[in-house]
């Protein structure tokens, strides 16, 4: 699998950046539990499983900094509206191919998989119900599993069997295990627009 580009620096404690707060620069961002002490106390957080959380950030010209409750109030957005807008901005990045998508017809066990990467927000694409539908079509299955080993990689593949999932996780760990900004090697199932943490071990 191709290597990801270097991550953007992040500053999640709400410190003011040079760019103004802008709705067009708002994106979802995934952080592991170990990162929570660095997140501003007023920042909204949403757990998705495997000790990974969704927060919101602003892209300030290469510097990523955390959106606070005060920032959202300035934009007159509550959490749900801000999350929805952030996902729209993320979808625009994918549409413009700033975030790349590659289809591999044969992976472990002969099963296909999709690699999303090339951008610091790539892993957050797991939050997109529309992309989950796209993946189901490409993979020819409604049982889609996902891995977010670090913030610049999302892999989607047929859930298959516990054995095929372990083989896929081994491939991911071997190829993505040394990347910066690790998230989790736990797997997720994407079902009916929802994310469900799997516990095969």
Image (spheres, rainbow, N blue to C red):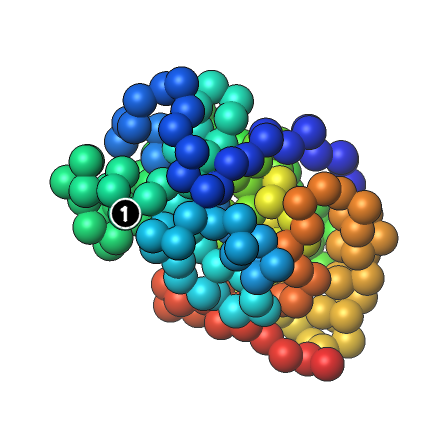
Residue at the extreme left: 76
- Comparing 153 with 66, the one in front is 66
Residue at the extreme right: 174
Q: Quadrant of the C terminus?
A: bottom right
Which residue does the image show at 79% across and 56% down from the upper left? 173
Label 1 residue SS: helix
Q: Relative to 194, does residue 10 appear above or below in the rendering?
A: above
Q: What residue sits right under mark 1 in the picture? A: 69
67 left or right of 189 in image = left
Query: Where's residue 166, x and y in %?
Result: 77, 70
25 left or right of 121 in image = left
90 left or right of 103 in image = left
Residue 138 appears anywhere in the view: no
Which residue does the image show at 68% across and 29% down from the upper left? 5
Looking at the image, how many numbered discs can be counted on the residues?
A: 1
Q: Relative to 48, does residue 154 appear above or below in the rendering?
A: above
The local crowd at label 1, few if under 14, some if 14 to 19, many if 20 or more residues have their Cα within 10 Å, is: some
Q: Relative to 39, does residue 20 appear above or below in the rendering?
A: above
Which residue does the image show at 45% across and 65% down from the upper left? 47
User: For residue 8, what is the image quadrant?
Assistant: top right
Q: Quadrant of the N terminus?
A: top right
Which residue does the image show at 42% across and 33% down from the upper left? 15
Residue 53 appears anywhere in the view: yes
User: For residue 54, what is the image quadrant?
Assistant: bottom left
Query: Where's residue 115, x and y in %?
Result: 64, 44
Query: Where's residue 49, x and y in %?
Result: 52, 69
50 left or right of 137 in image = right
């Amino acid at each position: 699998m191709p290597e990801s580009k270097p991550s953007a620096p992040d500053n999640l404690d709400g410190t003011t950046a040079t760019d103004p707060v802008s709705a067009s620069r708002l994106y979802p961002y995934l952080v592991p539990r170990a990162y929570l002490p660095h997140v501003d106390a007023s920042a909204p957080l949403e757990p998705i499983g495997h000790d990974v959380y969704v927060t919101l950030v602003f892209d300030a010209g290469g510097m990523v900094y955390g959106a606070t409750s005060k920032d959202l109030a300035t934009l007159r957005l509550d959490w749900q509206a801000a999350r929805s807008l952030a996902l729209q901005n993320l979808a625009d990045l994918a549409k413009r191919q700033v975030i790349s998508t590659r289809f591999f017809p044969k992976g472990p066990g002969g099963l296909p998989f999709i690699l999303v990467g090339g951008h610091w927000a790539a892993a957050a694409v797991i939050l997109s119900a529309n992309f989950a539908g796209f993946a189901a079509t490409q993979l020819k299955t409604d049982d889609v599993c996902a891995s977010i080993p670090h913030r610049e990689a999302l892999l989607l593949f047929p859930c298959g069997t516990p054995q095929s999932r372990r083989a896929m996780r081994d491939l991911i760990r071997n190829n993505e295990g040394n990347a910066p900004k690790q998230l989790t090697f736990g797997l997720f199932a994407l079902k009916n627009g929802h994310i469900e943490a799997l516990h095969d071990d």
